[in-house]
Image (tube, helix red, strand yellow):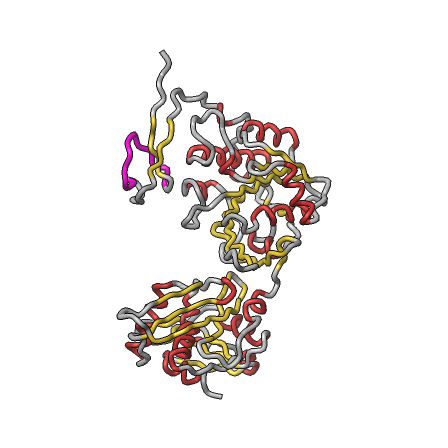
């Protein structure tokens, strides 16, 4: 008599497996993450999922070649910057983002540049070969070394890769790939995890670089188990609002480079165009003599980026004031407002406060605190700040302005873009070189009240 298949429940966040359903995962504590799947009635052969991938030999430490890894330049400087200098041979890279943000577009552009000297295999599980051809025509991708395959079966894909031996493989997307031995649907936790594992072993054993496209869920996280991020070498996120043309490529994990670098692109009819000067882009179209605006400087890896912070403070029509912010942490904005009331005497208790970072950019660094505070005070008092002034510094709960790192790089970027005054933390001023002090008017401040008094002086 054939053995009946049974249902199991697997957590979509941590892959915890249980025979019964739980509202809250016993392992990670997340709610409503247990998904029902059909368990395999009989376990497949242990070698079934290996797909004939060569077994790695055992080596002594001194026998292993420790030369610098070989990297392939993509032809896009911003893309290479995020990867740490290019695509490492034998690496597995996961690139994710919202639908329509430009993941497939930028990968096709990479194919055009790398196809001059490398063989590339583009595997699509969502689009037909004709659809890819139409998009390639629009992007003017015509390299002869790009090969297209519309397939979702992992076994067929692995055999094709072993036969063709390309230098680069693109899987678009991992949620559409299916392993026949697993009795679960495409996109399930088991399919995504095991499929990624197979591609990882294939990349390491054959020295082939593989890009895997991953979808994101409604919370912005990669769809599928969190363990997927631990399998790959590099995790790239595409950020940006659908209503804005600018896109930010950010590295969340990189075994071959820094995780602090970002790449800035603009979505056009010709595809993704690099933005070599993001600060100039962020500051274009600034209003003149308008209250509630201040320029912040944040560090993204080794690159200082200037962004405009706008605040609007107005009387509330309700008993409880409203607080809203875009591009900045909501709780941190509330903390800054509380410090301004308690330590500086600027009262927002009867006021609605709205905060926005122009251009869809997001400020994660505490050094943006001072710019946010000055924009809020400027809107509250309806006094325009000097438009050629830059401010940065972290605000403590006592109202003090604390030191930030890379102070000279921030000042140099402000000087390059035409700013003539910088409001910086007092303790940062001591470590500045004499040369940087003579190039721009630098005003060191100890607390938030002295910072505002300094910035409105003509």
Q: Residue drawn at (28%, 31%), measured in percent from left and top?
A: 20
Q: Residue drawn at (60%, 42%), measured in percent from left and top?
A: 89
Front residue of 300/109: it is 109
Magenta segment: does it hold 374? Answer: no
Magenta segment: does it hold 19? Answer: yes
Q: Residue furthest front?
A: 317
Q: Position of residue 231 (x, y in %)?
A: 47, 40
Query: Where does the magenta region start and end?
Result: 14-25
426 over 20 or under it: above or below: below
Q: Position of residue 123 (x, y in %)?
A: 60, 36
Q: Position of residue 407 (x, y in %)?
A: 49, 72
Is residue 216 found left or right of 280 in the rendered image?
left
Residue 313, quarter of picture: bottom left
- Tell me which secondary structure the magenta stretch mostly adopts: loop
Q: Residue drawn at (52%, 55%), measured in percent from left and top?
A: 242
Q: Residue drawn at (42%, 33%), measured in percent from left and top?
A: 190
Is residue 305 found left or right of 164 in the rendered image?
left
Residue 270, quarter of picture: bottom right
Front residue of 261/152: it is 152
Residue 400, quarter of picture: bottom left
How many tags in the picture? 0
Is residue 285 found left or right of 115 in the rendered image?
left
Q: Position of residue 311 (x, y in %)?
A: 42, 72
Is residue 311 found left or right of 409 in the rendered image?
left
């Amino acid at each position: 008599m054939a053995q009946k298949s049974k249902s199991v429940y697997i957590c979509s966040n941590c892959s915890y497996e249980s025979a019964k359903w739980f509202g809250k995962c016993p392992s990670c504590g997340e709610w409503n993450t247990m998904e029902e799947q059909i368990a395999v009635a009989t376990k497949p052969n242990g070698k079934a999922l290996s797909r004939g991938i060569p077994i790695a030999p055992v080596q002594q430490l001194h026998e292993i070649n420790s030369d610098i890894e070989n990297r392939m330049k993509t032809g896009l400087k911003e893309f290479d910057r995020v990867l740490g200098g290019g695509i490492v041979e034998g690496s597995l890279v996961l690139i994710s983002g919202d639908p329509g943000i430009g993941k497939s577009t930028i990968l096709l552009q990479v194919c055009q540049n790398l196809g001059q000297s490398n063989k590339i295999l583009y595997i699509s599980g969502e689009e037909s070969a004709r659809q890819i051809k139409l998009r390639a025509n629009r992007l003017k991708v015509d390299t002869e070394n790009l090969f297209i395959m519309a397939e979702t079966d992992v076994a067929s894909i692995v055999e094709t890769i072993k036969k063709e031996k390309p230098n680069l493989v693109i899987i678009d997307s991992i949620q559409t790939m299916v392993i026949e031995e697993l009795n679960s649907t495409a996109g399930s936790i088991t399919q995504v995890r095991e499929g990624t594992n197979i591609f990882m072993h294939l990349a390491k054993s054959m020295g082939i670089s593989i890009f895997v496209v991953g979808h994101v869920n409604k919370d912005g996280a990669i769809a599928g188990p969190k363990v997927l991020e631990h399998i790959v070498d590099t995790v790239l996120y595409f950020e940006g609002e659908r209503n804005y043309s600018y896109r930010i490529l950010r590295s969340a994990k990189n075994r071959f480079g820094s995780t602090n670098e970002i790449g800035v692109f603009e979505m056009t009819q010709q595809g993704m165009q690099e933005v070599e000067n993001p600060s100039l882009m962020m500051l274009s179209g600034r209003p003149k003599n308008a209250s509630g605006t201040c320029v912040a400087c944040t560090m993204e890896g080794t690159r200082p980026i200037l962004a405009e912070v706008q605040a609007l403070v107005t009387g509330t029509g309700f008993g409880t004031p409203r607080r809203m912010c875009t591009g900045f942490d909501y709780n941190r904005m509330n903390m800054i407002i509380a410090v301004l009331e308690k330590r500086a005497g600027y009262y927002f208790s009867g006021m609605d406060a709205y905060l926005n970072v122009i251009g869809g950019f997001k400020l994660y660094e505490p050094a943006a605190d001072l710019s946010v505070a000055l924009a809020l005070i400027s809107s509250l008092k309806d006094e325009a700040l000097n438009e050629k002034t830059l401010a940065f510094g972290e605000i403590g709960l006592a109202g003090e302005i604390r030191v930030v790192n890379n102070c000279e790089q921030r000042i140099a970027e402000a000087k390059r873009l035409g700013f003539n005054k910088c409001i910086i933390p007092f303790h940062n001023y001591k470590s500045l070189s004499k040369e940087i002090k003579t190039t721009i008017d630098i005003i060191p401040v100890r607390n938030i009240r002295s910072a505002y008094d300094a910035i409105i002086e003509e």
